[in-house]
Image (cartoon, helix red, strand yellow):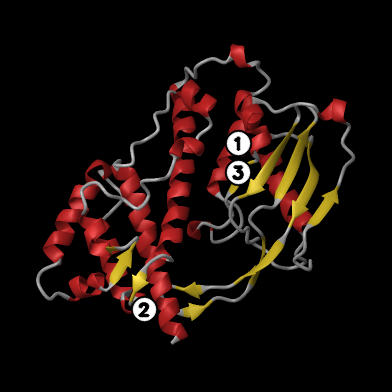
Amino acid sequence: MDGGVRSIQTKAPNEEKTKGTHICIRLETAWLPLLQTAFLAEDIIREFVETICDRTGAKDITVEKIIAKTETVANFVGVWGLKRAEQQALSAGTVFALQKESGWSENDLAVLQEVLFSGQGCRTEEGFGQLRLWPETAAYLFAGKKAEGERHAIRSNAAKKIAENILMQRIKTRIRLQAEKDVHELRGKVEDATHSFARLESLLGERKDLGKAKGRFQEKLQNELRAQSVLDKRLQNLTLQGKELKEILLAKDAIPYDTLRFEEEVPKELAEDAGFVIPDKSNGIIFYEYWLWFFRHGRKLAVARKGDK
C-alpha cells in the first residue's frame, strides 16, 4: 500500500437487506498487525473478523466496506534507548463496516466489545490498536434492535460488571491518550529527567487500594523532596501549563485532565441501563492511570531527546 486512502468494496450492500444488521468500527490509534508480510488492510481486518466469528460461533459476519490509510511507525525502546524497527500500520481514523445477515445477538455484541477494548495487533500496552464503534452506529450496538421505549435496566450482576468494566476502560483509554498529549507540553530540561520519571512511577506503587492512591503518592513525594535532592532539582526544571511539575503533583485540587468530559466517552443509554456512575476527576483510579502513563511517556520522551543531542 502507498499510504493513500483506499476505499475497498468487498460486497455490494443491499440497503433494505442490511438495514439494522451492519455496524462500523473506527481506529482510535494506529493498528500494528502482528505479521508485517504482505501488508494489506483487507487481510488484517478479515483476520479480525475471523477472531469475532471464532469467539461467537457466527458464520455470517463479513466485511462490507473499508476506508483505510496506512503509515510507518518508528519510535524508541524506553528501557534501552534504542530505535525500534519501522513497522507498517493502519492509521488512526481508518473505518470499516461489518455485516451480519442474521443480526447481532447480545452475545455477539458482548464479544465484540471485549475484543475492541482489549486492543488489536502488537504493542497494545503502549496504546496501539485501539478500536471503537463509529458514532453513527453506537446507539444501535448498545440498544440492539429494541425501540428506545423498550429499554430495560441490566439485572444480571455479571452483565453489569462486564458493562462497568467496558465503560471504565473507555475512560482509562481517554486518560492515557491525554497523558501522552500532556507530556509533549512539558517545558524545561526533559532530557535530564529519565531517572526522575522512573522514580516518580515507583512512588505510585502497585495498582491496588487506589482510593488512597493520591494521598499515598503525595506523602511519598513530600518525603522524597528533601532539600537539594536530585529529584527536587529535576522537577524544578520542568513546567507544565505554566506551573512547576512538582507543584502540580502536590496540588490538592488542580489536575491537568480537569477539562476532560468523561460523559463523552460513555454511551448514555448503556450507562443508565447498567447503573454506571461516571467517576469524579478526583477518583484515585483516574489519578493513578493518568500519572502512571504520564511518567512512562515522560521517560520515553526524555530518552528520545537525549538521543537527539
Neighbours of disc 3 within 10 Å: few (<14), some (14-19), many (20+): some
- Which residue is denoted by mark 2 in the rendering? 191
Callout in the foreground (2, 3): 2
Describe the element under mark 1 as helix, strand or loop: helix
In the image, is residue 25 above or below residue 292?
Answer: above
Amino acid type, mark 2: Glu
Position in image of residue 96 (x %, y %)? 73, 46
Instruction: Name the side, left or right, on which 89 lies relative to 46.
Output: left
Amino acid type, mark 1: Val
- Which residue is denoted by mark 1 in the rendering? 111
Q: Which residue lies furthest to the front in this view?
A: 242
- Which residue is denoted by mark 3 in the rendering? 132
Q: Distance between the residues labelled 1 and 2?
A: 43 Å
The residue that appears at 86% across and 25% down in the rendered structure is 16
Give me the disc on residue 248: none
Q: Which corner quadrant holds the C terminus? A: bottom left
Describe the element under mark 3 as helix, strand or loop: strand
Amino acid type, mark 3: Arg
Residue 287 visible to an observer of this rendering: yes
Give the mark, 2 or 3, whose residue is nearer the N terminus.
3
Instruction: Name the side, left or right, on which 225 lies relative to 182.
Output: left
